[in-house]
């Protein structure tokens, strides 16, 4: 074999290069501008799961030829891409980048706890922490989502990226039937929903629309 053949369909390279580009731009335009420091390099991965939108894991990978060299992981869950805009997906990337920033330059909460320092850093980069993912939710806790602040720094930067042509192309959930028709395959796994008012929990498909029987509040996926 003469060298390594160049892929005719560079799907992997294109998609991960897009994520790497977004990470680098957010690193400069958000974190350096807001805090005066940049995040160290990390591995960005796609990782499916029942409940998470993404996660940050410090020192998750070890270099094979230099075992003392470690790097962090930021994972995005492609099962959660369906029905969400590129802006929302990239906001999850920045959410996890804030965890990375806090791990290297701040004091993270114990375990999965999202503490006040993390919440303040989220707001600084233009994401409002919320346990419900909507206005009015608690800013700290074990499971905290967020929503994008329309006038925040993240929204400004991501719109510039879109103008420059950045776009995500792939998500989970597409299968082809025997007749050749493309069908949407809905995940069979169940998602935890909770009521932001009384804390009642329920389990259903990720696409379910649930109302709390006690409070009549719309339940949110955790």
Image: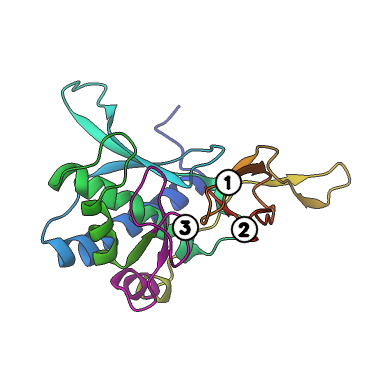
Q: Nearer the viewer, mark 3 or mark 1?
A: 1
Task: Give me the residue at 22% from left, 42% from top.
Answer: 108
Q: Find out whether residue 198 is within the magenta segment.
A: no
Q: Label 3 crowding class (10 Å Cα cut-off): few <14, some 14-19, many 20+? A: many
Q: Which residues are magenta?
A: 130-159
**Seen in the image, is 169 located left or right of residue 137?**
right
What residue does disc 3 label?
A: 89
What residue does disc 1 label?
A: 200
Q: What numbered label is drawn on residue 215?
A: 2
- Label 2 sits on a secondary structure element that is loop
Q: Nearer the viewer, mark 3 or mark 2?
A: 2
- Which residue reaches farthest front? 214
Task: Give me the residue at 61% from left, 61% from top.
Answer: 217
**Seen in the image, is 37 located left or right of residue 24?**
left
Against 6, residue 126 (above or below) is below
Which of disc 1 and disc 2 is earlier in sequence? 1
- Label 1 sits on a secondary structure element that is loop
Q: What numbered label is drawn on residue 167?
A: none
Against 65, residue 97 (above or below) is below
The part of the image, by quadrant, that contains residue 203 is top right
Against 213, residue 74 (above or below) is above
**C-alpha separation, residue under disc 3 versus residue under disc 1:** 27 Å
């Amino acid at each position: 074999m003469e060298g390594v053949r160049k892929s005719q369909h560079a799907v992997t390279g294109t998609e991960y290069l897009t994520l790497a580009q977004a990470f680098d731009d957010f690193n400069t335009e958000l974190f350096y501008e807001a805090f005066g420091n940049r995040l160290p390099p990390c591995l960005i991965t796609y990782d499916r799961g029942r409940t998470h939108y993404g996660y940050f894991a410090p020192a998750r990978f070890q270099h094979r030829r230099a075992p003392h060299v470690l790097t962090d992981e930021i994972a995005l869950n492609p099962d959660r891409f369906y029905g969400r805009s590129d802006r929302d997906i990239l906001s999850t990337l920045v959410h996890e980048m804030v965890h990375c920033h806090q791990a290297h330059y701040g004091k993270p909460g114990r375990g999965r706890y999202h503490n006040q320092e993390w919440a303040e850093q989220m707001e600084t980069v233009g994401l409002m922490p919320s346990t419900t993912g909507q206005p009015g939710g608690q800013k700290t806790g074990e499971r905290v989502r967020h929503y994008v602040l329309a006038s925040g720094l993240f929204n400004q930067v991501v719109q510039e990226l879109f103008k420059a042509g950045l776009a995500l192309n792939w998500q989970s959930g597409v299968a082809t039937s025997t007749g050749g028709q493309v069908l949407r395959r809905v995940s069979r796994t169940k998602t935890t929903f909770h009521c932001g008012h009384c804390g009642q929990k329920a389990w259903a498909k990720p696409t379910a629309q649930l109302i709390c029987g006690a409070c009549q509040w719309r339940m949110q996926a955790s």
